[in-house]
Each structure stands twice: as structure tokens, then as C-alpha cells.
Amino acid sequence: MSLPQTGDRFAAFRHPAYTKFFLARFLAAFATQIVSVSVGWQMYEVTGNALYLGLIGLVQFLPALLLILVTGTVVDRYNRRRIVAICLGVSVLCVGGLLLLTVENAFAPVPVLVILTVFGIERAFMGPAVQSLAPNLVPEKDLANSFAWNASSWQAASILGPVAGGLLYGVGPIAAYSVALAFMLAGAILVLLVPKPAQKSSSEPKTWTYLLAGFRFIRHEKIVLGAISLDLFAVLLGGAVALMPIYASDILEMGPFGLGILRSAPGIGAIAMATFLATFPIRHRAGITMFIGVAVFGLATLVFGISKVWWISAIALAVMGAGDMISVYVRETLLALWTPDEVRGRVNAVNSVFIGASNELGEFRAGTMAHVFGPVAAVVIGGVGTLAVSVIWALAFPKLRRIDTLDSTDQPTA
């Protein structure tokens, strides 16, 4: 199966449906980043306990794990565009709930964690739906270009959202949640404007074999297994996002706006790398390049963990984002190329759990370790672990390491 690259930097945007999808995804991601910064800072401000920062990640991850057999099946069986719109509608209600708690001066761990659990249920469906919808909106020849722009959309939001969140939170949490609510609503409306795309479905009976098809496919395709498990363990160990409120408040003494800067730094590095990859796609040694990206991510995490100077910390986070983007670009392209559309939802449901584990569960890992050993030790141990993972996975998955180009998935080159 081949994926010719057109060389047109804006190829994906030649398709109006994709343009609407891109804008909707950007607005939703922007709103999510504002909420993430605001909830993290507000929770630490109210409790002063790093454990609650870890719980924020855990309650958003568990629904994806518990519902893994349901979400993928729903995405493969029903209209993916409608699923994304419903998910964004639920997000609107969740952000509205956080706004109401803040207005009523009732912000407390239990009600907030309940709302974030609902938010996690929504994201459990949203992840595979979004990942499965995107390849239905552009022809195969523009897939790699669309993945680079998809990543840019998220990373642009990761740059602007935290800064906006920090500034808005400085004005007041009510302002932050109000803007997030407006952006989330706009994203939901834009998704409804996307024409219903063609979608292949399977007539296979809904047996256990059908439900477990995503697992079976990933287990069989060692390249896909290696790529998504690499991301799982690398970010699970190296993620430091949950501890940024502690770094901004206690270690670097930067305040809420400083937290926005720290949260934006990985996005700056990632979008710079995504823009580079959209213009100059990876032509050769894609597999080894992905492993190098993960190693860079781990090394930068280590530097961030030991730094006591804010600008060194910000640069380290930007390098983390660039390294992670290389891995994301290669992984998502391989996943789309190797996965038939009729099982795409179930495969992406498993992939979403891996992503959720690497992010939300990684935040729980960081928060719990920080509670026991301190934030610096938690980040440093994670960075060392990520470096180790990049080496171990490169040795354990030689076929993935030998992938040469992203133009063909026929055979990896020697």
C-alpha cells in the first residue's frame, strides 16, 4: 500500500470538509488546554496537595480503559461525525459545570473529579472518533499532510491555550472557564457543518471476535504494536505536565502566567517540528528517526527536571515537544496506512487507551511519585526511564526500526 506525497504544503486544506474539521479540532483543543491549566492551578491552590493533580489525570484515563470494547465498536458502527459532535456537546456541559462550581464558590476535589470523570467518558469516545474521522475527509495521497496539520492544530492550541488560560486565570477563573465554554461550543457547531463522509463498515456479527478485532490487529501487526507501545511507555514515564503547577509555583516561582508559559513551551517545539514535517516530510529512515525523537524527549525531560532557571526549563520543554512530535507524526501515519477503515474505530479505541495511559495515567504516575519522593525526583526518574525505553524498544522491534519511508508499507528496508 503506497502513500504518494504531493509536495503541496496545504494539500489537506484543498478539501473543505477537512478545513471545518481542522478548525473544530483546534477550538476544542484550545478550550481543553484552558480548562487543563485552570483546573490544575485551582486544584493546587485549593488543596496544596500534589496527589490531587495526579487524580485529575487518573479519572480522565480510566473511562477509556473501562470502555475500550464499547468505544471502538460504536465508532465503527455509527456516524463518526455525529459522535464527535455529541462528545463536544458533553464537553460543553462539563466546562459549564466547572464554571458553575466556580461562580458558586463551591470548587472542591470531589465535585470537580466527578465532572472530570464525565469529561473522561466523553474523551473515551472522542479520541477514536476523531482519529477515525480524519482519514475519511481527505484522499489517501493527502493523508500524511493531514496528519502533520492535525498535529499542528493540537500543538497550536497547546501553545495558545495555556498562555490564554494563565492570562485568563489571572483575571479570574470565571473568565477562563467562560472563554473555554464559548470555544467548545463553536467547535461543536463546526463539526455539525462537516458533510457526512463515506465510511466503510463491516457486516460481521457483533461477537467477541468482532469486539476484540482491534486487539487482534495490533497484536498481529508488530509495526503498529511497537509504535503505539513505544509512545505509551515513553510518555507514561516522561510526562511532567501534571507537576507544572508545582514547578511554576514552588520551584521556578513564576505564578499562573508562568504556568501558561511552561504549558505552552512543549507546544511551541511541537508545532515548529510539525510545520517542518509538513514542508519537508520524512523521506528515509522513518523508524530510526522515531526512536531518536523519543530519546530526545527523554533527555529534555531530564533537563527540565533538574533545572532551576525558568528559561532553561522552557527550552527543555520545547525540545520535549519537538521530539514527541517526530514520534507522533511517524506513529499516526503508520497507524492510518496499516489499518483497514472497517476496523479503524476499534484499533483507534485501543490506540486512544495507549495515548490516554501515556498522558493521563502518566500524570497520575508523576503526581503520586511527587507526593512520595518530591517533584524533581519524579521528573528525573521519568526522563531516565524514557531514555531506557527508546533503546529497549529499538532492540525489541527491529522491523519497526528498519522502516525506511512513509510512502510504502510493503516491507521495511534492511
Image (cartoon, rainbow, N blue to C red):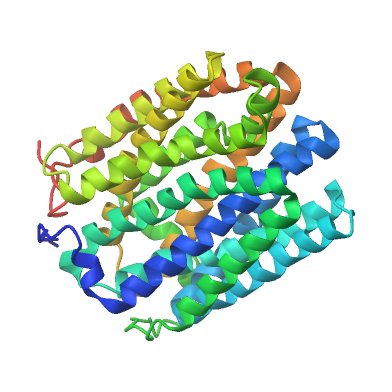
In the image, is residue 140 above or below residue 225? Answer: below
- Across and down, in percent, residue 412 comes to 14, 44
The quadrant of the rendering that contains the N terminus is bottom left
Q: Is residue 343 visible?
A: no
| Nearest the eye: 144 or 102 | 102
Give the left or right position of residue 170, taking residue 213 as reference.
right
Seen at 33% across and 81% down, the residue is: 200
The quadrant of the rendering that contains the C terminus is top left
Displayed quadrant of residue 323: top left
Seen at 46% across and 18% down, the residue is: 312
Displayed quadrant of residue 270: top left
Seen at 53% across and 50% down, the residue is: 161
- Across and down, in percent, residue 107 comes to 85, 51
Give the left or right position of residue 106, taking residue 80 as reference.
right
| Nearest the eye: 270 or 3 | 270
Seen at 16% across and 54% down, the residue is: 409
Displayed quadrant of residue 42: top right
Q: Is residue 143 visible?
A: yes
- Across and down, in percent, residue 164 comes to 56, 48
- Across and down, in percent, residue 231 comes to 42, 40
Residue furthest out toward the front: 171
| Nearest the eye: 64 or 367 | 367
Give the left or right position of residue 303, taking residue 323 as reference.
right
- Label total for image: 0
